[in-house]
Image (cartoon, rainbow, N blue to C red):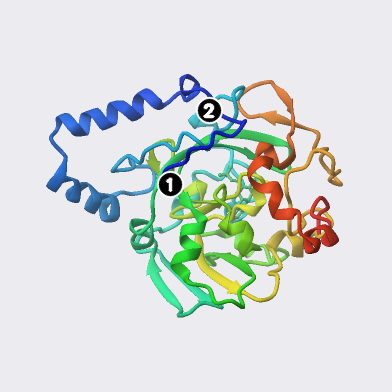
Amino acid sequence: MIYHRRPSWHIPEALATDESTFFNRRQLLATMGLGGAASALIAQRAHAATKPGDEYLPTPERNDVYKAGDEREITDEEIASTYNNFYEFGSHKQISKKAQKLDTDNWMVKIDGEVEKDIEIEAADLTAKMPVEERVTRFRCVEAWSMVVPWICYPLAELVKFAKPTNDAKYVRFETFLDPKIARGQKQSWYPWPYVEGMTIKEAMNPVALMVVGVYGKVLPKQYGAPMRLHIPWKYGFKSSKSITRISFTKERPVSFWQEVSKDEYGFWANVNPEVRHPRWSQAEERVLGTTERIPTQKFNGYGEEVAGLYSDTLAKKEGVWLWR
Ligand code: MTE
């Protein structure tokens, strides 16, 4: 995919801290003579033999248009990998060890609802059909912390096209696995399991919306929501469902997990907005993980140039996208 326009939130290449590793890996593959026929071997390995946390092969190219902004550095991998929200494994941040119980082998994904034909596909086969790339983006949680992460991902729009929704489809609903035997958090009956999120098809088609399959040059580790999770950079982090097993196209707006828990705190739109007060956390600033910094939060998390147009129509205005509902 080739992008020509450079939005305002670019970072210079020099700040992309793991770039040398990126090029070294490519060089290594080249000197090993792994071009042409041998790349099939790599593809096969990427499909079948890599486990969450292994190096992602073949290394995807970094998309240097969608970046995080001049002033932001990539968050230390150790910090991002051990400070996670994944309530299936506990309602605190230190779930990375417990999440290793998740069995991601032969992970099946169902695509159904308002589509030409239901599809059941293994996550790895789905990824193999997609234009995988690396993107460095900002991630902002409604709890007022943020990070900058090099995701390995593909545009969610490509998945929507693959699904072939009918003209009746207006929304996409994402459902996470349900298995209380390994995910003990799912025994907590006051939560409306499984985790569900949703968005309009127009939002899902925006080129900033991503499906993530890796991070920091690795196959997506389990605590991040292996084998596939969303990342919607202009929305609060809770919209980015992890470990997805079902993608449904619907006429009606889906009700999300957090809306069911507390609709006044977690709305459907949930666009990052420093001006809208959350009942518990001010959204004016954010704590940058791995630093002592607090920085001002930007509208749409800095991606307004790309996404503000999504909310200019009458329906969105009437529904108050700046609010939580
Ligand atoms: N997806 C599932 N299935 N379960 C969750 O608890 N937490 C959400 C989101 N996706 C969550 C989820 C929240 S609140 C945030 S902030 C992000 O995942 C955290 O992603 P990270 O752990 O990769 O930083």
Name, please, the residue furthest toward the bottom: 117
Residue 200: assigned label:
none
Disc number lying in front (1 or 2): 2
Residue 247, percent from left and from top: 53, 68
Which residue position holds label 2?
74
Q: Secondary structure at mark 1?
A: loop
Q: CA distance from mark 1 to mark 2?
A: 17 Å
- Amino acid carrying label 2: it is Ile
What residue sits 60% from the left and 28% below the top? 69
- Amino acid carrying label 1: it is Leu
| Tally of marks | 2
Classify mark 1: residues with Cα within 10 Å, few (<14), some (14-19) or many (20+). many
Residue 287, percent from left and from top: 71, 29
Residue 183, percent from left and from top: 54, 59
Q: Is residue 64 visible?
A: yes
Q: Please indicate whether residue 266 sits to the left or right of residue 173 in the image.
A: right
User: With respect to residue 190, does 219 lie above or below?
Assistant: above
Which residue position holds label 1?
220
Pick the residue in front: 143 or 230: 230
